[in-house]
Amino acid sequence: MPQALIFPDPDALLRLTLANREARALMIRTTRMAQEASDIHQASDVAAAAMGRLLPACAMLGGLMKEAAGRLSVTVDGNGPGGRMHCGVKDNTFKITVHNPQAVLPLTPDGRQDVGGFVGSAGKLIVVKDFDGGEPYTSVSNLVSGELGEDFASYFTHSEQTPSLVALGCLNEAGTVLSSGGILIQALPGCSEKSLQALEMRIPFFANISREIYDRSLRELAENWFRDLDLEILGEEPLTLRCDCSREKMRRALLALGRAELEKILETGEDTRLTCHFCRTERVFGAGEVAKMLDESEESYDAH
Ligand SMILES: [Zn+2]
């Protein structure tokens, strides 16, 4: 499909409060990131759709982290043909990977990508929050359907004990992502029954969130959906897909294999090729460099 069909707004997270601040919402567009991830992993359409739903879900989790220096790592392991999915978030910057990005599944009877079938539902959603200087905090919840929307709603409601409505969607076909995004609405403590009912009446708007987001800005959608619900827009933040790997980090990972492994590598006399799971960048370490690393590990051994 021609590029001109893609809505021009950049990926973003829009924060708002509703119902006299009795509820908060995050609206998210991740169309460009989903396309980039699909290209990086040469993903099948169903894998791209799964990433196009996981990215906005992780943007919600990241957007709710209060600690500025926090890092978030999300694993979805549902035992489906797609295998495990991982997404890392720091400062609204994302990296994402899926174990079998080329796995293909037939469309569902209603013509959608079978994300639930791809992810599988016999497994866990694992969220690790890592703060500088503190112990990482891990929470685990059971997957509900593998469709991801329900799974994250269940996570927010049970693990974080905040009643939450989550809609996620990705509209994509033949390698092109037309839209990806979602909305999270959370009732805050003290939210009145009247406000809850008013919010629930909006649910039908979100049933096809990827089509809503496809050709309208987040602000325009917020105005349309919540105009009469004391809508207050708090701000908009850009979202970016960018891996934080480096040659130095990979070198340290190689070094961490230990002497025995490094010696084995050296005996083969061949270059060592390491590929980042997130951005698929391959880095080559020649035999000379591995020999130097062995010397280093010797020195650190002697130092003990
Ligand atoms: Zn990388």
Image (cartoon, rainbow, N blue to C red):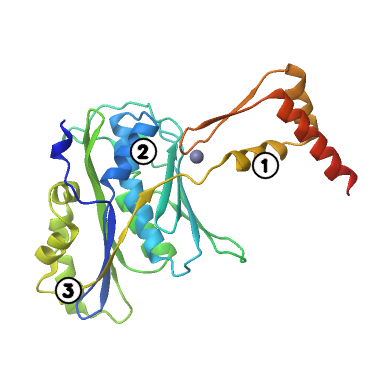
Q: Is residue 232 left or right of residue 71?
A: left
Write down the quadrant of residue 122 in the picture. Answer: top left
Vertical comparison of 221 with 34: above or below = below
Q: Where is the N terminus found, in terms of image quarters?
A: top left
Residue identified by numbered label 2: 37
Quick one: 295 or 114, which is closer to the camera? 295
Q: Position of residue 243 (x, y in %)?
A: 46, 44
First reached walking from the N terminus: tag 2 or tag 1: 2
Q: CA distance from mark 2 to mark 3?
A: 33 Å
Q: Is residue 115 visible?
A: no
* Labels 2, 1: front one: 1
Q: Which residue is mark 1?
A: 252
The mark found on residue 90 in the picture is: none
Q: Residue at x 58, y 64 (%)?
A: 132
The mark found on residue 231 in the picture is 3
Relative image position of residue 29 (x, y in whole percent):
25, 52
Q: Taking the image as drawn, is residue 12 in sight?
A: yes
Q: Amino acid at mark 1?
A: Arg
Image height check: is 236 above or below 104?
A: below
Which is in the foreground here, disc 3 or disc 1?
1
Secondary structure type for disc 3: loop
* Marks 2 and 1, how far apart at CA: 26 Å
259 relative to 114 in the view: left or right: right
